[in-house]
């Protein structure tokens, strides 16, 4: 059985810090749900609360509307994949995977069949008799996954499962875990600090910060409609222009030290005179050499700021520019598939971006 | 209140375990010691410093005090002189046969020194083997009094030869632990040779040295067996031993014990704070390359001669015991003239010895079982749980390392007389508890190291998959720390088998004599006593060497950590 998971304003202190602070989440049955945030944001604590390793001090945790808050971890039927895999070094792969079934007193025949099936899912059937120390990191990771899946858990919990793998393997495993999720169709809650991992895999993501939920939504929602500068910056990276909101109407107009910026999008409830950030994604910036100014700049739909190139980084599929505006704000621009370089260090040029690409957000402190 | 509680992992089970542990320590460590203190300071007329004052004013007592302190200091000094060159050669140089020599160095520790004393007497007596040999060779024409008047130096020599391996293990570990890059940095900045040693190596090794030195000091300072065998009566340990019997008439026994505790604590403090200077964390340890460099042929010869001559010296008592145990006739000759295995047969047929072996096996097994249960529980709480009073629990579990067996046993006799645990009626329960308490630190350390090496995630993974915490303990944690438990248990068991002072003091009836007390009793028998005692000592030696070998296999290089304060 796969279940929905609900957290109702759950709180937990660890030592002296409020690790999780009035956190509420609703995770649908069968969803691949991500908890995303910088280190120390409480995402792992939240996962361990769901697993039952911690008991909430306030609030409730529900599986399918049944309160689990005080159910001990070994009775919750969750399958957890640990960051360092936590394979028992004194058991071979097969025994590691069979462990949960043994605890559930599954008959010998069924046990063998289920272990074999679980190892097939992660493509490790050939390694059943190996000891964990004879496996590579990626193989250990897959055994850990099989061990969590074989018990047919109500919820699969993954705590930064890919963080110990090298970059190439990490990207391969993304697809594999997504495939497995599709195959078994169980609720999976996945903790990571890697926003690319979250964007590429998640059905929905909850962004956490300082123990609290900042924003939850589909990857596309979070990327295109961030509700805070923190989310805009954490998901995908963005440029933030500091300014004061001057006009609220068809367009939002923001007075910045580098010039006036018009925006099509903004969070609700902003009033004239409010201190704000304009968020513009690096790939929305267009570099226009000063020699060919664009007439469209006069139209309110397109912003144009003058800038100077500080550095250029060629990355093959991308070219990254770092630019300074008139007020010394630093902007990052990305050109995809660069056939020729658009500018070189020291060039003065015009930076263009559509009002449609700008999101106006309230100013906030951006530390962790 | 709730905030205070929230900082800890407490549930009814943990709470109950914690309370039982506290009660255990309260009953068998704090109460007996407190009892000793109150008797030393309180007369029927109230608080009084009379006994303590008497201790420091009566010349009879001050001599005894001075003797014991001198004994401790002299043994520590000699043990240092023996172990320093050994550690230096064996840590800093590689040469063929190094492993073997390393093992040889540890051999002396496997014989309780009071058994060694039997052999020593045989060899170094006025008409013992050494003098006879020298006389025959014409090197001397008068027998030399090797053991010195009053036997002080006899005790010093024997204890130094017994205890230097403890110091060696600590020194070697400390030397090996010095990050080579620290010395390289000093060399890079212009230090070399002795200057390098004095400014960098020595200060870094010092804490490790003092950790071992304090154990050696306390051991020698409070050793009961050796002075007894050498009939050197003017030391605190023997005085206390004699006073146990008339405890209730003569309160000076309490005063002596209080002074022993005070001096022990004082030297302990001295070693930790003033001389040891705390422990240096080795920071930024990257890849630690071995400090050892290949020895030149000349250096190899020097290393071999140093190690072999020290070992030869250290094995004199063992040789003496071995020869004694095999002697059929040995009178005014360098070596026995006739040999026999009769005394080994006697060990297994003599009522006293057979019974004592049975007693020791039973007492040590039960006390080891206690140690396993207590040690694993305490180590688990320390390593895995946040519990209130964690620091105190840790300190109490480690206290027996610095608490002489003599003091503990005396405290038990004093505190539990005329209670159901009265050792004069049935010493078995208190013997078991004394053994268990004395060796508890080994078990706690061994198990704690195991828990530290085992990631908590391994346990959580098991619980997550449906195993109860209890099942997890037996299915996952225990198998993973099994090697540590074996090593700790083997040490606890074998040291309990050869425990001297608590056995001598607590075992009051022949029916309950453990091996060590039986050996002591046999020594008093004129005819075959010393021979059977030696045979028994040799068997004990075999047991302890076997155990240390097994423990060494599990502990490897970290063996020294077991013998440090």
Image (cartoon, coloured by chain):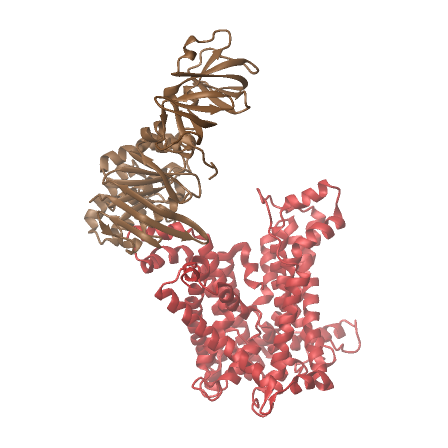
Q: Colour of chain A?
A: brown
Left or right: where B286 falls relative to A352: right
The image shows residue A314, relative to residue B190, as above or below, that is above
Left or right: where B186 falls relative to B452: right
Q: How far from the left and from the top, in percent, is residue B162? A: 62, 68
Question: From the image, which quarter does the N terminus of chain B lie in?
Answer: bottom left
Quadrant of residue B36 within the rendered picture: bottom right
Q: How far from the left and from the top, in percent, is residue B78? A: 70, 66
Viewer-side residue, B485 vs B359: B485
The image shows residue B28, relative to residue B280, as above or below, that is below
Q: How far from the left and from the top, in percent, is residue B223? A: 61, 75
The residue positioned 46% from the left and 39% from the top of the image is A368
The residue positioned 62% from the left and 62% from the top of the image is B211
* Count of numbered circles on the image: 0
Q: How far from the left and from the top, in percent, is residue B237? A: 62, 80
The residue positioned 41% from the left and 48% from the top of the image is A19
Quadrant of residue A173 within the rendered picture: top left
Question: From the image, which quarter does the C terminus of chain B lie in?
Answer: bottom right
Q: Colour of chain B?
A: red
The image shows residue A176, relative to residue B33, as above or below, that is above
Left or right: where B159 falls relative to B354: right
Viewer-side residue, B132 vs B355: B355
Viewer-side residue, A151 vs B549: A151
Q: Is residue B129 visible in this depiction of the protein?
A: no
Q: Is residue A5 visible in this depiction of the protein?
A: yes
């Amino acid at each position: 059985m796969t279940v929905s998971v609900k957290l109702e304003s759950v709180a937990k202190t660890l030592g002296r810090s409020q690790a999780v602070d009035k956190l509420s989440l609703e995770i649908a049955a069968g969803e691949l749900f991500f908890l995303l945030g910088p280190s120390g944001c409480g995402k792992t604590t939240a996962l361990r609360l769901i697993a039952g390793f911690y008991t909430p001090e306030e609030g409730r945790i529900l599986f399918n509307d049944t309160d689990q808050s005080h159910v001990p971890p070994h009775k919750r039927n969750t399958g957890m994949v640990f960051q360092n895999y936590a394979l028992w070094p004194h058991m071979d792969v097969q025994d590691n995977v069979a462990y949960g079934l043994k605890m559930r007193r599954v008959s010998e025949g069924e046990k063998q069949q289920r272990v074999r099936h679980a190892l097939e899912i992660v493509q490790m059937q050939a390694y059943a008799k190996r000891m964990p120390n004879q496996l590579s990191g990626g193989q250990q990771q897959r055994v850990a996954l099989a061990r969590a899946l074989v018990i047919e858990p109500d919820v699969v919990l993954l705590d930064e499962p890919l963080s110990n793998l090298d970059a190439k393997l990490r990207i391969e495993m993304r697809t594999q875990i997504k495939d497995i999720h599709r195959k078994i169709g169980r609720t999976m809650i996945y903790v990571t600090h890697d926003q690319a991992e979250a964007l590429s895999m998640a059905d929905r993501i909850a962004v956490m910060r300082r123990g609290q939920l900042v924003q939850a939504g589909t990857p596309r929602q979070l990327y295109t409609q961030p509700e805070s500068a923190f989310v805009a910056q954490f998901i995908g990276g963005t440029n933030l222009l500091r300014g004061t909101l001057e006009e609220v109407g068809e367009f939002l107009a923001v007075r910045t030290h580098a010039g006036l910026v018009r925006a099509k999008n903004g969070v609700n409830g902003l009033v004239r005179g409010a201190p704000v950030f304009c968020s513009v994604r690096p790939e929305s910036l267009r570099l226009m050499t000063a020699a060919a100014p664009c007439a469209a700049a006069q139209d309110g739909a397109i912003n144009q700021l003058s800038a100077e190139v500080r550095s250029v980084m060629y990355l093959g599929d991308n070219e990254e520019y770092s630019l300074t505006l008139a007020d010394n704000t630093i902007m990052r621009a990305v050109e995809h598939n660069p056939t020729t370089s658009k500018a070189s260090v020291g060039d003065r040029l015009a930076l263009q971006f559509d009002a449609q690409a700008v999101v106006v957000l309230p100013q906030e402190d951006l530390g962790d | 209140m709730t905030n205070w509680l929230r900082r800890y992992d407490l549930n009814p089970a943990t709470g109950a375990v914690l309370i039982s542990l506290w009660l255990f320590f309260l009953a068998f460590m704090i109460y007996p010691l407190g009892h000793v203190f109150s008797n030393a300071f309180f007369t029927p007329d109230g608080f009084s410093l009379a006994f303590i004052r008497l201790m420091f004013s009566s010349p009879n007592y001050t001599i005894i005090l001075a003797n014991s302190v001198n004994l401790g200091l002299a043994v520590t000094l000699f043990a240092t002189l023996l172990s320093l060159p050994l550690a230096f050669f064996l840590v800093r140089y590689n040469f063929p046969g190094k492993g073997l020599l390393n093992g040889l160095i540890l051999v002396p520790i496997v014989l309780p020194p009071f058994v060694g004393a039997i052999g020593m007497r045989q060899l170094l007596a006025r008409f013992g083997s050494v003098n006879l040999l020298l006389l025959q060779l014409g090197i001397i024409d008068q027998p030399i009094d090797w053991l010195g008047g009053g036997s002080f130096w006899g005790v010093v020599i024997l204890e130094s030869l017994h205890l230097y391996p403890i110091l060696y293990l600590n020194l070697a570990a400390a030397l090996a632990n010095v990050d080579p890059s620290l010395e390289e940095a000093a060399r890079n900045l212009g230090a070399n040779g002795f200057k390098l040693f004095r400014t960098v190596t020595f200060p870094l090794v010092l804490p490790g040295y003092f950790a071992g030195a304090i154990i050696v000091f306390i051991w020698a300072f409070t050793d009961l067996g050796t002075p007894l065998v050498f009939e050197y009566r003017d030391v605190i340990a023997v005085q206390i031993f004699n006073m146990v019997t008339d405890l209730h008439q003569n309160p000076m026994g309490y005063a002596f014990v209080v002074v022993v505790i005070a001096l022990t604590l004082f030297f302990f403090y001295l070693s930790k704070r003033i001389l040891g200077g705390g422990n240096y964390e080795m920071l930024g340890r990257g890849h630690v390359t071995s400090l050892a460099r290949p020895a030149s042929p000349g250096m190899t010869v020097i290393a071999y001669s140093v190690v072999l001559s020290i070992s030869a010296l250290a094995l004199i008592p063992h040789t003496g015991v071995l020869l004694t145990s095999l002697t059929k006739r040995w009178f005014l000759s360098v070596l026995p003239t006739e040999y026999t295995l009769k005394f080994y047969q006697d060990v297994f047929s003599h009522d006293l010895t057979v019974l004592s072996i049975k007693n020791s096996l039973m007492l040590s097994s039960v006390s080891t079982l206690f140690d396993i249960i207590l040690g694993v529980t305490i180590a688990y709480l320390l390593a895995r749980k946040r519990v209130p009073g964690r620091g105190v629990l840790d300190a109490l579990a480690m206290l027996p390392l610095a608490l002489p067996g003599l003091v503990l046993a005396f405290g038990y006799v004093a505190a539990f007389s005329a209670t159901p645990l009265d050792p004069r009626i049935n010493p078995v329960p208190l013997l078991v508890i004394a053994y268990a308490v004395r060796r508890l630190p080994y078990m706690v350390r061994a198990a704690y190291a195991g828990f530290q090496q085992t990631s908590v995630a391994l346990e959580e993974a098991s619980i997550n998959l449906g195993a109860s915490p209890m099942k997890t303990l037996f299915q996952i944690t225990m198998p993973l720390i099994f090697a540590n438990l074996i090593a700790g248990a083997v040490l606890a068991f074998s040291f309990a088998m050869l425990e001297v002072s608590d056995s001598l003091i607590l075992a009051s009836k022949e029916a309950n004599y453990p091996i060590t007390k039986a050996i002591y009793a046999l020594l008093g028998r004129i005819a075959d006593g010393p021979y059977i005692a030696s045979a028994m000592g040799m068997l004990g030696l075999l047991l302890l060497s076997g155990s240390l070998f097994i423990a060494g296999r599990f502990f490897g290089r970290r063996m020294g950590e077991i013998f440090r304060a």
